[in-house]
Image (cartoon, rainbow, N blue to C red):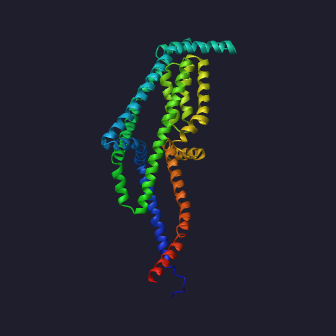
């Protein structure tokens, strides 16, 4: 007997769709986790392509084939990266050898300072003998050599990921126009226009981001080179290039990471010089934040400071260091797209209100002319 309490059919359908949606979501999350590395590689490749494509487009406008232009751009970027690694690596090797040679003298200085300051007499002869006989840093180096297999595995994995990024980036840059046409052809006219707008904004903002960072890195390297040379810091060019590049291309904490190396190198040679180097780095950072950076970014990449800081935190939380690198271009693109959309929305009512106004007089004039002709 039906008492009217039977479950409605829509409730049954809702329960079925709820469980199907839950299972689909669970499966999708598993797929994303399994493909996380590939997705990050694709994301990095996309934004590297955004940064390189303006240069390739410039060459394409001058009748240089996109494939050749892309290869030239890749060679230029690779040469810059190799030069940076060689300069900084040479300076690090020189300072490491200096530290190993001067370590016994540093041990004597520490012992003398403890004796003069606190009256503590410690015997460091055994420590020096162990160091010179193969202990200390040399023993640390030997232990590090025992883990060379693990280090080699990490390096091979990193090189493979870099090769994958380079491969995807080359395709995205060389075939950029064709790829956009292929995507737009499968969308409606309105959605294709939105995708094209976002793509163009992302390319523009990423290119301007790289351009502004490059200018600031050059200014930073030049100023620090002059300061390090005046302070007689070893390897002033290499350390200045290190500070310029790292401080600009690592968001938020780049300046602090960049300052550690020159301060340590200066301290190895003279504590007083190390203090002056620290003062120079901190002082320049303030000058850059309040003078150089606003003027450069005002002409290249406009983004609110609070939005920039929040985007870096969010990007780091989502994707780690990769997210920190991509946070500012993504935030600038989103800000530009939202601003463009709001501007268009604000203009629409004015256009709609302005366009009907001339119609009635025009219609009256046409009607009067038609009546005159009939008469």
Q: Residue furthest front?
A: 375
Q: x%, y% of residue 235?
A: 49, 20
Q: Residue furthest right?
A: 118
Answer above or below: position of 242 versus 301: above
Residue drawn at 47 percent across, 38 percent down: 211
Q: x%, y% of residue 171?
A: 34, 46
| Residue 243 in view | no
Residue drawn at 61 percent across, 14 percent down: 111
Q: x%, y% of residue 344?
A: 52, 59
Residue drawn at 46 percent across, 44 percent down: 206
| Residue 88 in view | yes
Is residue 350 left or right of 186 when viewed as pictured? right
Number of numbered callouts drawn: 0
Is residue 38 left or right of 216 when viewed as pictured? left
Foreground pick, 159 / 17: 159
Answer above or below: position of 129 versus 252: above
Foreground pick, 299 / 252: 299
Residue drawn at 60 percent across, 36 percent down: 289
Image quarter for residue 54? Answer: top left
Answer above or below: position of 181 versus 113: below
Q: x%, y% of residue 185?
A: 35, 59
């Amino acid at each position: 007997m039906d008492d009217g309490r039977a479950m409605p059919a829509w409730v049954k359908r809702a329960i079925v769709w709820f469980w199907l949606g839950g299972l689909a979501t669970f499966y999708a999350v598993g797929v994303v986790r399994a493909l996380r590395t590939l997705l990050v590689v694709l994301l990095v490749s996309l934004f590297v392509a955004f940064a390189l494509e303006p240069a390739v487009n410039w060459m394409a406008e001058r009748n240089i084939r996109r494939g050749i232009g892309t290869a030239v751009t890749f060679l230029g970027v690779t040469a810059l990266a190799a030069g940076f690694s060689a300069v900084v690596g040479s300076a690090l090797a020189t300072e490491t050898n200096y530290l190993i040679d001067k370590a016994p003298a540093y041990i004597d200085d520490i012992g003398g300072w403890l004796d003069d300051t606190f009256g503590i007499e410690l015997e460091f002869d055994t420590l020096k003998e162990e160091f010179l006989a193969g202990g200390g840093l040399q023993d640390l180096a030997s232990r590090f050599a025992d883990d060379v297999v693990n280090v080699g595995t990490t390096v091979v994995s990193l090189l493979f990921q870099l090769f994958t990024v380079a491969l995807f980036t080359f395709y995205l840059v060389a075939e950029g126009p064709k790829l956009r046409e292929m995507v737009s052809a499968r969308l409606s006219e309105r959605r294709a226009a939105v995708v094209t707008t976002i793509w163009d904004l992302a390319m523009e903002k990423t290119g301007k981001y790289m351009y502004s960072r490059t200018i600031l890195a050059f200014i930073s390297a030049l100023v620090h080179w002059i300061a390090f040379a005046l302070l007689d810091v070893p390897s002033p060019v290499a350390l200045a290039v290190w500070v310029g590049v790292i401080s600009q291309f690592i968001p938020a904490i780049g300046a602090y990471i960049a300052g550690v190396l020159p301060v340590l190198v200066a301290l190895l040679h003279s504590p007083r010089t190390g203090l002056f180097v620290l003062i120079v780095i901190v002082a320049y950072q303030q000058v850059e934040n309040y003078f150089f950076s606003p003027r450069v970014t005002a002409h290249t990449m406009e983004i609110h400071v609070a939005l920039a800081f929040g985007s870096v935190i969010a990007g780091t939380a989502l994707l780690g260091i990769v997210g920190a690198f991509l946070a500012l271009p993504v935030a600038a693109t989103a800000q530009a797209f939202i601003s463009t959309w709001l501007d268009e929305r604000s203009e629409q009512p004015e256009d709609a209100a302005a366009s009907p106004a001339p119609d009635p007089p025009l219609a009256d004039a046409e009607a009067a002319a038609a009546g005159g002709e009939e008469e």
